[in-house]
């Protein structure tokens, strides 16, 4: 089953990305609408390639590390977590539709399970990193406010 799914990604990866690009455009995500389409396409292609690599290796570390990097980059650029997760969801849904339409009925359940597992790990790590970054920012803001209060307090 994994081999057929890997083959599907090799054969239809570009088609999957193209369809995901259309759906992502229809989602009207603020930061994605302002970006170069080719840059967004490259990001989706990278996710498809990493998905295929994880399936072949039977481990998710490459895409999980990528999710952490994506989170840091997008957070620093002001993207809302929901925008980034929506882009990943669109790609996953597009891939799922291709799986259902291309694989034999006895392969579909296992393939969808594998796709879901990889994308769930990706989105979980993305969210965890966003939460960490938000907490760090809040702590830094709180500390800066305390320091400013100390600096402004009356001297005795």
Image: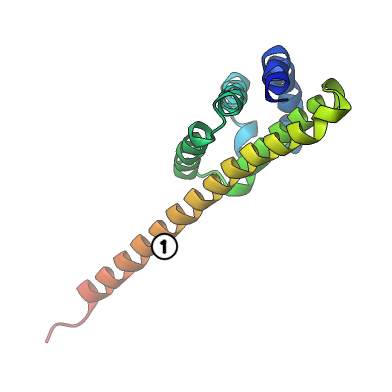
Front residue of 11 and 56: 56
Q: Is mark 1 on a helix, strand or loop?
A: helix
The residue furthest left is 156
> Image quarter for residue 117?
top right
125 to 66, vertically: above or below:
below
With respect to residue 68, does 4 lie above or below? Answer: above
According to the picture, the residue beneath numbered tag 1 turns out to be 138
Residue positioned 85% across, 29% down in the render: 106
Residue 128 x %, y %: 51, 52
The foreground one among 17 and 95 is 95
Residue at image point 80% right, 25% down: 98
**In the image, farthest residue toward the top:** 11
Q: Indicate the position of residue 57 as horizontal and vertical percent values.
A: 54, 26
Whether residue 29 is visible here, answered yes or no, is no
The number of callouts visible is: 1
Indicate the quadrant containing the N terminus: top left, top right, bottom left or bottom right.
Answer: top right
The answer to whether residue 43 shows anywhere in this view is yes
Corner quadrant of residue 99:
top right
Q: How crowded is mark 1: few (under 14 residues within 10 Å), some or many (20 or more)?
A: few
Viewport quadrant of the C terminus: bottom left
Image position of 58 (left or right of 102): left
- Left or right: 8 with respect to 68? right
Question: What residue is shown at x 82% (from left), y 22% (from top)?
Answer: 103
By what rule are the colours in the image chosen? rainbow
Pinpoint residue 67: horizontal percent, then vertical percent. 52, 38
Q: Toward which corner of the image does residue 43 lie, by quadrant? A: top right
Q: Nearer the viewer, residue 82 or 127?
A: 127
Give x and y (percent) for residue 132.
44, 55
């Amino acid at each position: 089953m994994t081999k057929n799914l890997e083959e599907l990604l090799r054969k239809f990866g570009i088609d999957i990305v193209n369809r995901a690009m259309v759906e992502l455009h229809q989602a009207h995500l603020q930061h994605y609408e302002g970006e170069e389409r080719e840059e967004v396409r490259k990001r989706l292609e990278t996710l498809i390639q990493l998905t295929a690599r994880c399936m072949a290796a039977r481990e998710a570390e490459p895409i999980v590390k990528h999710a952490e990097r994506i989170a840091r980059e997008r957070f620093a650029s002001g993207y809302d977590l929901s925008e980034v997760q929506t882009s990943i969801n669109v790609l996953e849904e597009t891939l799922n539709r291709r799986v259902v339409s291309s694989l034999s009925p006895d392969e579909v359940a296992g393939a969808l399970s594998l796709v879901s597992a990889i994308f769930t790990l990706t989105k979980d790590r993305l969210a965890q990193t966003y939460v960490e970054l938000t907490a760090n920012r809040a702590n830094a803001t709180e500390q800066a406010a305390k320091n400013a209060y100390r600096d402004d307090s009356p001297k005795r």
